[in-house]
Image (tube, grey):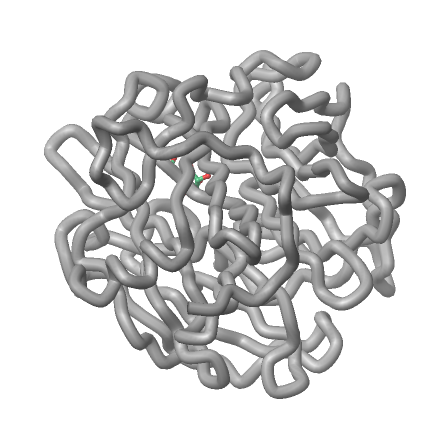
Amino acid sequence: MIVYGTELNNIPWEERPASCSDVLWRYSKNPIIKRNQAKDANSIFNSAVVPFNGKFAGVFRVDDRQRRMNVRRGFSKDGLNWQIDDSPIEFIQQTREPIESDYKYDPRVTFIEDRYWITWCNGYHGPTIGVGYTYDFERFYQMENAFLPFNRNGVLFPKKINGKYAMLNRPSDNGHTPFGDIFYSESPDMVHWGMHRFVMAAGYTPWQSLKIGAGPSPIETDEGWLLFYHGVLLSCNGYVYSFGAALLDLDKPWNVIRRSKSYLLSPQEIYECVGDVQNVVFPVAALVDSETNRLAIYYGGADTVVALAFGYVNEIVDWLKYDN
Ligand code: BMA
């Protein structure tokens, strides 16, 4: 199997423990980012990292001690130990008129062609998808929101598809929602979005029965786009967020080739089960070494901390062949 992308020899990595037969395994020193590891932070979770200049950079969801939700920049030499800024990113407006951001949360970062694109859940009369970019993690620019409210989990593909920018997203309403399905949209310019196509619905199996949402940017393989996505179960004790995977058609990503019946990871460790919101694992970023197929997934634990899980892209694509 071929994984397209670049080599990443310094990907954070730990081999599968001998006692583990799962296709994905947790880092033994989780969580890698603790809740108060930045100034005034109540919690740091659901955050995005990318390789940057031989090291790593990231955009972090930091809820502060007023419980305001915003995003901050961070840098790391090894992808494990992070220095996160004292205050939120100040975006330079590239819009006709500045747009409000009542809050920003759940950022994703995707390198496309010449820059790092950032999408996030932007508070504009309700949640919708904010869009921005940076070339250097020094200056950040904000564009128009991609959609009308309400929408969440806007996740860009790492390259244009059929000549257009492409984004998975999840139309929704203002709260916990009966609109829980993933859609695909495309744009010639990152401003005007259309050609909306249905991708997949909540349901299929119980762990993903209430709603689903795209996680990290999809990973390109010769068998299709590998997508990690979260799914929500409504239990008698509240929501349970797990995550699984799907394989999407390379040219028409709204066509689902395979989808996991079982979850890959569900909240089972203490830092996933106990925190500001119990029972949440929420994947947001994935690093891949195309040479060795090694994969590191960054996910939020219990809306409080950042944790890491490891796997091999080819093993997960193979797993999808019998778990769907
Ligand atoms: C979702 C988002 C995520 C959060 C999850 C669990 O709706 O708000 O940021 O991790 O709920 O609380």
Quarter of the image with the C terminus is bottom left
Horizontal and vertical percent for residue 305? Answer: 48, 23
* 39 is higher (above) or lower (below) than 114: above
The residue drawn where x is 21% and y is 27% is 19
Q: Is residue 111 left or right of residue 289?
A: right
Quarter location, residue 280: top left
Q: In this view, does 160 lie to the left or right of 184?
A: right
The quadrant the N terminus occupies is bottom left
Q: Note whether residue 126 is visible.
A: no
Please determine whether, in this image, residue 41 is positioned above or below residue 121. Answer: above
- 104 relative position to 251: left or right: right
Tell me where residue 228 sits by quadrant: bottom left
Front residue of 313/184: it is: 313
Quarter occupied by residue 314:
bottom left
- Residue 229's x, y, as percent? 37, 54
Image point (42%, 71%), residue name? 183
The image position of residue 45, as x and y in percent, is 51, 30
Q: Where is residue 177 in the image (x, y as percent from the top left)?
A: 32, 52
Left or right: 70 as drawn, with respect to 289 = right
Seen in the picture, residue 183 relative to 204 is either above or below; the reply is below
Q: How many marks?
A: 0
**Residue drawn at x 30%, y 76% as measured from the top left:** 257
Residue 5 visible in this rendered orientation of the protein: yes
Specify the quarter for ligand 1. top left
